[in-house]
Image: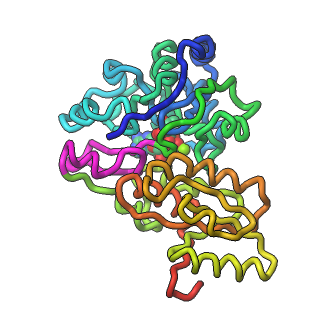
Amino acid sequence: YWTVDIDVDIKNIYPQVVEAAHYLKEGEVVAFPTETVYGLGANALTDKAVAKIFDAKGRPADNPLIVHIANVDQLDLLTKEIPETTIKLMDEFWPGPLTLIFKRKPNAVSSLVTAGLDTVAVRMPDHPVALALIHTAGVPIAAPSANKSGKPSPTMATHVLADLEGLIAGIVDGGPTGVGLESTVLDCTPEVPVILRPGGLSKEEIERVIGQVDQDPALQHSESSPKSPGMKYRHYAPSAPLFLADGDKEWIQELIDQKRNSGTKVGVLAPKESASFYNADVVAVCGSRSNLKSVAHTLYQALRSFDEKNLDMIYAEVYPVQGVGAAIMNRLEKAAAHRRVTQGKTEK
Ligand code: TXA
Ligand code: MG
């Protein structure tokens, strides 16, 4: 596990935090930074406040929200059953990019938060601004990622503004987020815990602490219905169709050339090792292949950068499905709606 190096001067922005906490107490929604992505927060205890989150994002009502807490005592408000495995995980990884699913305590949070499920998702974010905000508001804060439904999650305050300006009470700007991808969602209600969404904390890191965990099989097969309702929606997508390009850079350049020769405007998403090799209409760089965390950190920013460029299509390089690579590939697969071209196979 790594610590997220987030450079914010909490003393400097504390007045913003106090103002944002005031809005939250009044039942308004505000965006705030976490170590993963920006969240759009509301008081998790009141329907009216939570409803504003769904309205602003255009989020389907059957997609439940994560409840954010600033200290472990707040968990007692949300659940009566805290399994042994979750205690180990909380000790090791909270605050951090791990969301745990618990049996829900009846009549605790707004039923809009849990979208009618008998479970509740909870996490303690590892960000001084998020922790100060939740603490100052004095209530658990329901917060999805602060993007319009379907768009990549925001890793900078400007992304939040681009999607939600005029629809929310405000944003606390804490600079770019650290991890860059959302938290890992782990269901601890079954005997063997199940990863419902790969994220900032890898399967390998979780297994080091509690032994074997499973992965929701629906994550591999797009046809079966996932246990995390949010995973069934198209997501993370730039406006131009994206294709995963599984092959070497020379072959990918040939694909690009073929398309461009027929007048198609082509973007490419690549790490710094190969980015300068490509000749395309837009090349967006995301981190370094030698450090997948750097790819995660800049992935959404790179995906968003294509949108102003009026492209017809985008090719994205693929990454090994190990460590945070599992989450990177999960997001890219969704952004591509599973479209993939593979070297040595004929294109469909
Ligand atoms: O890193 C993160 O998790 C960010 C920051 C803001 O904390 N939040 C985030 O929230 O990504 P959101 O709403 O964009 O994604 C929450 C995911 C969705 O896939 C949702 O379906 C799932 O968690 N989820 C929430 N409650 C659940 C529950 N009770 N059972 C299963 N899945 C749940
Ligand atoms: Mg989201």
Q: In which quarter of the image is the C terminus?
A: bottom right
Where is residue 30? Give x, y as percent.
Answer: 62, 25
| Residue 64 in sight | no
Direction from residue 107 to residue 25 in the image, left or right: right
**Which residue is more in the foreground, 284 or 220?**
284
Q: Image quadrant of residue 286? A: bottom right
Where is residue 346? Give x, y as percent.
Answer: 56, 88
Q: Image quadrant of residue 218? A: bottom left
| Residue 74 in sight | yes
Residue at position x 31%, y 51% from top?
203
Where is residue 186? Give x, y as percent.
Answer: 34, 45
Residue at position x 73%, y 54% from top?
307
Direction from residue 177 to residue 266 in the image, left or right: right
Instruction: Magenta stretch: give its range.
Output: 183-211
Where is residue 163? Give x, y as percent.
Answer: 70, 41
Q: Quadrant of the N terminus?
A: top left
**Which residue is more in the foreground, 134 or 255?**
255
Residue at position x 37%, y 39% from top?
98
